[in-house]
């Protein structure tokens, strides 16, 4: 049987060694937070720069006049009924479908 004094001595020896080191320290947390803040600032700066470039390019494209070929521009005409080509071997056009009771 284990004596009480032996148990007390074992616990006293364990207590004298101190607590095990923590896996996360305050310095580690502060450094990690600083890295995250720096990364976010860099990402924000890059996004703002990209947006500014996009706005400038859009303004340039809108502000510049269109380049057209020299000469007069005329509107398109609708085709005449005589300008429609029907091949000679085409089947005849079907009669339009009318509702019952109408001619």
Image (tube, rainbow, N blue to C red):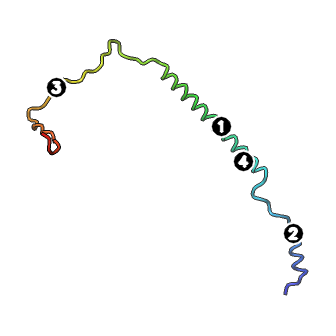
Q: Nearer the viewer, residue 37 or 96?
A: 96
Q: Is residue 46 left or right of residue 99?
A: right
Q: CA distance from mark 3 to mark 2?
A: 106 Å
Q: Residue furthest left?
A: 88
Q: Residue furthest front?
A: 101
- Numbered label tally: 4
In this picture, is 83 found above or below 32? above
Quadrant of the frame with the N terminus: bottom right
Judged from this view, the residue extending furthest toward the top is 71
Number of other residues with Cα within 10 Å of mark 1, as a class: few under 14, some 14 to 19, many 20 or more:
few
Reading the image, the residue beneath label 3 is: 81
**Sooner in the amino-acid sequence: mark 4 or mark 2:** 2
Looking at the rendered structure, which numbered label has been put on residue 32? 4
Structural distance between the alpha carbons of marks 4 and 2: 32 Å
| Horizontal and vertical percent position of residue 29 | 75, 50
The front one of 77 and 49 is 77
At x 14% / y 41%, what residue is drawn? 102
Question: Is 33 left or right of 63, judged from the image as shown?
Answer: right
**Mark 1 or mark 3, which has the lower sequence index?**
1
Residue, disc 2: 15
Cβ–Cβ under 8 Å for marks 2 and 1: no
Could you give the CA–CA distance between mark 1 and mark 3, rounded to whole angstroms? 66 Å
Q: Residue at x 87, y 79 (%)?
A: 7
> Mark 4 or mark 2, which is nearer to you?
4
How far apart marks 2 and 1 lie (CA) works out to: 48 Å
Instruction: Please identify the quarter of the rendering in which residue 98 is found.
Output: top left
Q: Which mark is residue 78?
A: none
Q: Nearer the viewer, mark 2 or mark 1?
A: 1
- Element under disc 3: helix
Residue identified by numbered label 1: 42
């Amino acid at each position: 049987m284990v004596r009480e004094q032996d148990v007390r001595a074992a616990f006293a020896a364990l207590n004298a060694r101190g607590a095990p080191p923590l896996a996360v320290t305050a310095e580690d947390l502060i450094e990690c937070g600083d890295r995250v803040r720096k990364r976010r600032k860099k990402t924000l700066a890059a996004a703002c720069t990209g947006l500014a470039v996009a706005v400038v390019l859009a303004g340039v494209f809108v502000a510049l006049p269109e380049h057209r070929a020299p000469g007069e521009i005329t509107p398109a005409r609708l085709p005449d009924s005589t300008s429609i080509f029907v091949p000679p071997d085409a089947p005849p056009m079907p009669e339009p479908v009318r509702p019952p009771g109408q001619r």
